[in-house]
Amino acid sequence: MQNLNPDVFKSTTLKIGIDKKSLFPQKENIDLTMEIIPSDINRHDHDADDAITLTMKWDITYTDYNIPVTIELPAAAQKCRRKYLNR
């Protein structure tokens, strides 16, 4: 995807709602439309009729800022951590 033609992005909209008091993001809406021709990805000759239109929409709500959380390392990761630290 690093060689993806930037022209594939047909439309992109990003809206962020910010809390006036805390200045933290509250909501985020993203709309993205791409039109990809196989040659945009793998550089083989393909007809434009082979195009794929991809539409993505995200609606994100952010909550619970500054709420304490407990994060525990999974057992498999603990074994890996011990092995790495005991070198």
Image (cartoon, helix red, strand yellow):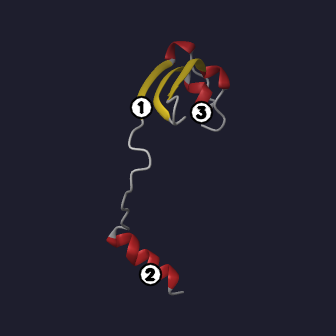
Q: Which of marks 2 and 3 is nearer the N terminus?
A: 3
Q: Do the residues labelled 2 and 3 touch (CB within 8 Å)?
A: no
Foreground of the two, 63 or 28: 63
Looking at the rendered structure, the kind of residue marked 1 is Ile
Q: Nearer the viewer, residue 17 or 15?
A: 17
Q: Is mark 2 on a helix, strand or loop?
A: helix
Query: Where, by quadrant of the figure, is residue 6 drawn?
Result: top right
Give me the residue at 39% from left, 56% from top: 68
Residue type at mark 3 is Asn
| Image quadrant in which you'd find residue 4 | top right
| Quarter of the figure with residue 71 | bottom left
Which secondary structure, mark 1? strand
How far apart are the alpha carbons under marks 2 and 3? 42 Å
Which residue reaches farthest top? Answer: 49
Residue indicated by mark 1? 60
Quadrant in the picture for the N terminus: top right
Q: Where is residue 87 in the image (x, y as percent from the top left)?
A: 54, 86
Which element type, helix, strand or loop, lies under badge 3? helix
Give the foreground label among 1 and 2: 1
Depicted 1 relative to depicted 55: above or below? below
33 vs 77: above or below: above
Between the C-alphas of marks 3 and 1, the distance is 33 Å
* Tag 1–tag 2 contact (CB < 8 Å): no
Q: In this view, does 42 lie above or below 49?
A: below
Relative image position of residue 60 (x, y in whole percent): 42, 31
Q: Residue at x 46, y 82 (%)?
A: 83
Report the residue marked by disc 2. 82
Q: Residue 49, how many percent across, how many down? A: 51, 12
Left or right of residue 65: residue 15: right
Q: Name the residue under label 3.
A: 42
Please tell me whether mark 3 or mark 1 is closer to you in this view. Answer: 1
